[in-house]
Amino acid sequence: MGGSLVPLSQFVLKVHSRCDLACDHCYVYEAADQSWRGRPMVISPKVAKQSAERIAEHARTHALRAVQIVLHGGEPLLAGRSRLEQIIIALRAATDGVCHLGLRIHTNGVQLNEAFCELFARHEVMVGISLDGDRAANDLHRRYADGRSSYDKVIAAVGLLRESRFRHLYAGLLCTIDIANDPVAVYDALAELGPPRIDFLLPHATWDDRPVRNAPGGTEYADWLIAIYDRWTAQGRPVRIRTFDSVLSTLAGGPSFTEALGLEPSDLAVIETDGSYEQVDSLKAAFDGAPETGTNVFDDDLDTVARHPGIQARQQGIAGLCEQCQRCPVVASCGGGLYTHRYRTSNGFDNTSVYCADLLKLIGHIGSHRPAAAAGLSGIPAHALTPPDLAALAAGAGDARVVTQLADAQQSLVRAMLGSVRQTASSTGMITADLSDAWSLLTTLDRAQPKALGTVLRHPYVRVWAMRCLEQLRPSAARPDPIPPAMVRRPAPGLGHLDAIAVAAAVHARVPAAVTVPVLDSAVHLPTLGRLSLGTSQDRPPADEAAAIAAVRVLGDAVVVETGHASWVFKTADLFTGESATPADDGRAGVWEQVRMLRAPSLQIALEDTDPYRDCHPWMAAPRLTDAEFAHWQTLFTAAWQEIESRHSAFAPGLAAGLTTLVPLSGVPSDHHASATTRHAPGAVALALPADPVTLALLLICGFQQVKLDAVTDLYDLYDPADDRMFPAPWGEGKQQLDGLFRDTYAHLAGTRFWQARQQSAPGPTAARSLAQWRASTLEAIQTLAGSGSLTSLGTSFVEGMRDSARS
Amino acid sequence: MGQGLMRSSDEGSAVSSTVLNLGGVPLEQLPALASVTEPMVQRILTGSSVAAAPATSFASSI
């Protein structure tokens, strides 16, 4: 077995072996194993230090990027602040420079106060709390030895964690199921406390000591969980629930997130207060001494523990399960359930779970009631990329086919957002006759002219508008990557822009239509086409502009715009071909400002300097370019594209397939090369025009990298979005959150490959120096990402692909 | 390993995402299907996701 060791990366450190509550369902004190009676109450500094060094040794030996340690009990807060801080410092000191250390503590909450929270904030320790639901549910079991309720103190503890200064420490709530409780009331009570995560635990039981049921052979636990699942999905899954997330993930071929389900190999060990290594401590429910390994931190390293037959038994995947489980159709999701729940005195763990019927029913229900299936959309596939496609993207490039797939997924998201805007507007009483007309036009075009509608829906700033509408319609919505208000230099978006989107599609299709659109910045906007500027200064829009509207009629070959007492008539073809001063019928000036196209031999993209929602980047969007300025952009763009095609051909197909829009920026210092993208404007790169085409090529490639990565992260979780820590960034003085660091690292990976290609085709000191700098900073950032401890398994693989590419 | 994307043995099997392919679903049906597409929208709005892995799989902690 020596060659097949699975390194351990999760550790439960028992810091106090007693508890201040006397919950009658506790596996530590009320179950078969009574080993706690012989343990020291509190972990000693010597055991804590040795434990920390063993963990660091193991991480070093196996080059682990991250380990997770849960401070546990008993009740860990009984160790006191001083001892806890000693332990935490010992753990941090031992692992510093070795691996990322994710620290959390799991508590019953009754002792949690401000001083503890400040300690945990100082040392970045997440806090999870046990709570069984509302007061009635919680008080069924979670009481003091004298029968007093713990509920009020726990709620106060959760209240502390919900304060903004401690909110980032709030890991979630853990609830042990009692089928006597109303499941929906329990779920509602927990959800009301705003936890980032919830999990529901089946009470520990074995075939010898079976779970409480209303009748033999029942599936009460499945029914209890199903009631919550149905409510949760009906609400749009507003909070993560680990059990349900795991089943949904495994049904889709992904990993499980809990040892209680799935076939993931166990990588967890427990260290008791006396330094004994143990297997997962739920085994205490099986028989006295069940978790023992006969090893300890002073005499044995963690490789010895990892080779223990009891731990390796839970690393065998399907081969480690009983015959009935191996034949079961839901084995990939169930994995035989929690190891402890399989125990029977006569044959050990070679059994199905004592909750087998419940797990089978629950997984079956979730499988047939996944959100798509519930609405009769079970035949609708999800967007998916193959592992080789993801690997190609991780390496930095990605061909036209892959980029087109990403763009198609973006279209699905935009369609979902449009549907949501329409539905939310209706449910909040915001629907108007104009909006109904716009929606009717959109759906007509969707049926009859899907290509024309698709042209408009692919416009990057349709999603920006939809995003802002949903934020307004749902003020409680919070984003992890908000467009800061200072960066959104637009008046509040009106739902009326939906009319502009619809009529622009009608113009593309040359289909008769009549709508009313808002006037913004003294202009009538037709997304993807341009704007009719009405002659008022953009800097001083009329005070009553919010109320200003224009009627737009598409008559096939002509488009009529009417505002106030003036009207303009355009030939439809003219809207695509150029800028023109067009007098209204009353002689009033009006200028049609077309969206101009930058053209290269194998590519044409929009130079967007008219859309009212384009100003959503860290720098200001430039005002309308003059003809001379546009000509300069065209000249540099042509030369930059030649540079890309000739020297950076790996990036050219993806750019040609997915880059649709460039937005000129202003206010960028002249010595600063700037490109910017936002996740909510897919296909668009905003930039200040540099002085030379080589730099423009670099900005295009790096900017488009972020567009690609944003599209990937719209499909998959590469990292935990709840991680709001700041990480050092090697290309600046500041720190970045994980999402920003990931985006910039991916862009720098492309920059590294850019300078590598330059060095190969046009060697020189500049290229050599740039290559060395970009590669070093990219690898440094990759190391930070890899060591963050917040990457998903997919994210870990993606980052490793990036690392391989940067090194090559 | 779950979604181990670099394994050559996986070349034929795509990694499914949480984004339904709505290209063939008529736009007019989407408001009525808002509860179905809500997780997709909410993921964009809030970043919450069913697939984000918790830091620990230890059942007695969260």
Image: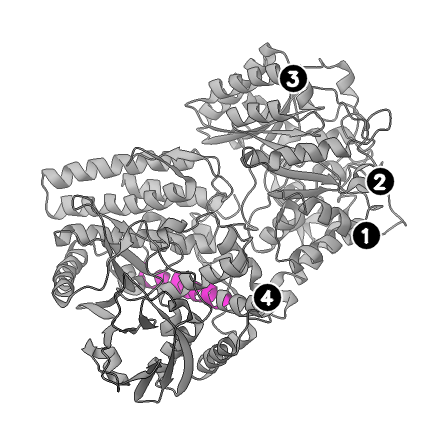
Q: Are marks 1 and 4 in contact (CB under 8 Å)?
A: no
- In terms of sequence position, does the residue under pointer 2 or pointer 1 come before the other? 2
Residue pointed to by mark 4:
A428
Q: Is residue A313 above or below residue A681?
A: above
Left or right, A496 with reference to A107: left
Q: Are marks 3 and 1 in contact (CB under 8 Å)?
A: no
| Three-letter amino acid code at the position of disc 3 | Gly
Task: Give the image location of residue A44, x and y in percent.
Answer: 63, 11
- In terms of sequence position, does the residue under pointer 3 or pointer 1 come before the other? 3
Furthest residue to the front? A543
Q: Are marks 4 and 3 in contact (CB under 8 Å)?
A: no
Residue interval drawn in magenta? A399-416
In terms of secondary structure, where does tag 3 sit? loop
Which residue lies at the image location 43% right of the left edge and 75% below the top edge?
A499
Q: Is residue A454 magenta?
A: no
Quadrant housing residue A431: bottom right
Chain containing the residue with disc 1: A
The residue nearer to you, when weighing A605 against A506, is: A506
- Name the mark nearer the viewer: 3 or 1: 3
